[in-house]
Structures are given as structure tokens and as C-alpha cells.
Image (cartoon, rainbow, N blue to C red):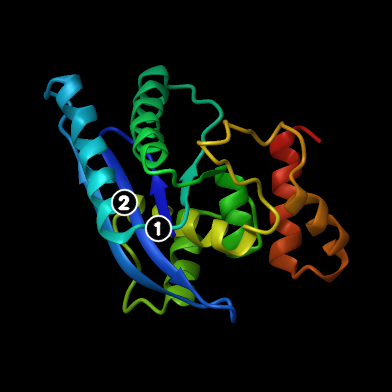
Amino acid sequence: MLGVDPGLTRCGFAVIEMQPNRTGASVHVQVTATKAEEDLSHRILAIQRAAEELLESYAPDVVAVERVFASSNAPTAMATAQATGVVIAAAAARDIPVAWHTPSEVKAAVTDDGTADKDAVARMVRRILGLPGLPKPVDATDAYAVAICHAWRSGIGAVYSMSAGTRTHQGAKTAMQKAAETQEGSMTPAQRAWRAAEKRAQGG
């Protein structure tokens, strides 16, 4: 599982392995940084190459990316979209499925609270993965959290196969989603919080 916190100035990548008992382990984490004064094409290429190297080295079964629907800062939104695009393309070239989770979904999955702050997320990531200290910087924390979110919710959240065409949270329900709904009564508090966050993201 490769989690990605996309960004052009700093792009967080985290490879994890999760266990059935809801614990996990960090396999690799890195934050690839580029400088604002660099040529835009070179910055985008650096993110693409970092993604490709990780995909080749660790061959994850899925790539989970934090999805930001909107931002009041247009340059930041554009940079995030550019970084996201090259990561998706790198995964698509290798037929690796890509999943998107909004920040509120990720927070709900990891902490039971879709409005949790960064410190709360970092503490739970440390606990879940058995890290020796709080993950730093925040881009690494977010990449870990996205990966954990998808690992726990892969039977509920939508998985997007790039070879089969892009799907969105607003699209038709997958078979996994339908099956998960029948199990909603047995969800943990964290799963119910995540489900509520997902519905809010859908506008439902």
C-alpha cells in the first residue's frame, strides 16, 4: 500500500503493510521536495520520478491519494493537481489501482473524528504503525494516514482502476460498497465515522 499526500513543493509518500488486527508497519516513508524557483517542468518531473521509483521498488497493490476538492489558494490547488496527476499517471502505466480519500475521510478513519487536528492524526499514526516517535514532517504523517485509511476501508471505499476507467466518489456504487452497506451495523466507531465523512463528501 502506497499512500500519497500530493504537493509540488513537498510530496509525501508512505509505504505500509497492514495486519488483520488493525495494526501495521512502516516499510518506507519519504518527502520529495522541489524549490519554487526551479523550472516548473523540472519540479513536476521530480515528483513523477520519485513516484516511479517507489512503484518499481515496492510494487504496491494500490496507491491511495489524498483528494482535495477545493482550495481558496489557486496556485496551491494547481500545484496539488499537477503532483497528483503525475502520480496517477505513474500508477496507471503499471496497471496499479488508485484510490482517493478526502482529508475528512482520512481523519475519521484514523482518529474517529473527521475534524481532528494534525497532532491527533500524528499520534494515532504513531500508535497504529508502532513508530518510535511522531512522524515528521506533516507531509509524511498525511501520507501514512491516507494509506492507513485505505487499508482499513478498502472494502467500503471506492477503488479506481485506471485500466478500467476513472470513477469518483459521486459515481455508481461498486459491488464492494454495496456489500459493505449490509455490514454497516457491525462497523466499529471509526468505520462509522469514516462512513459519515464519505457521505458528506458525496453531498449525501
Tally the marks.
2
Q: Is residue 134 above or below residue 162?
A: below
| Mark sitting earlier along the chain (1/2) | 2
Disc 1 marks a residue whose amino acid type is: Pro
Quadrant where the C terminus is found in the figure: top right
Q: CA distance from mark 1 to mark 2?
A: 6 Å
Coordinates of residue 187 in the picture (x, y in percent):
78, 68
Name which residue lies at 39% across and 29% down: 85
Q: Is residue 136 above or below residue 173?
A: below
Q: Residues within 10 Å of mark 2 (few under 14, many from 20)?
A: many
Name which residue lies at 27% across and 53% down: 56
Q: Is residue 20 left or right of residue 144?
A: right
Say which quarter of the image contains residue 37.
Answer: top left
Quadrant where the N terminus is found in the figure: bottom left
Coordinates of residue 103 in the picture (x, y in percent):
55, 45
Q: Is residue 58 above or below residue 41?
A: below
Say which mark, if any, is on residue 55: 2
Say which mark, if any, is on residue 2: none
Say which mark, if any, is on residue 60: 1
Say which quarter of the image contains residue 30.
Answer: bottom left
Circle 2 — which element? helix
Coordinates of residue 162 in the picture (x, y in percent):
51, 36
Q: Is residue 45 left or right of residue 131?
A: left
Q: Are marks 1 and 2 in contact (CB under 8 Å)?
A: yes
Circle 1 — which element? loop
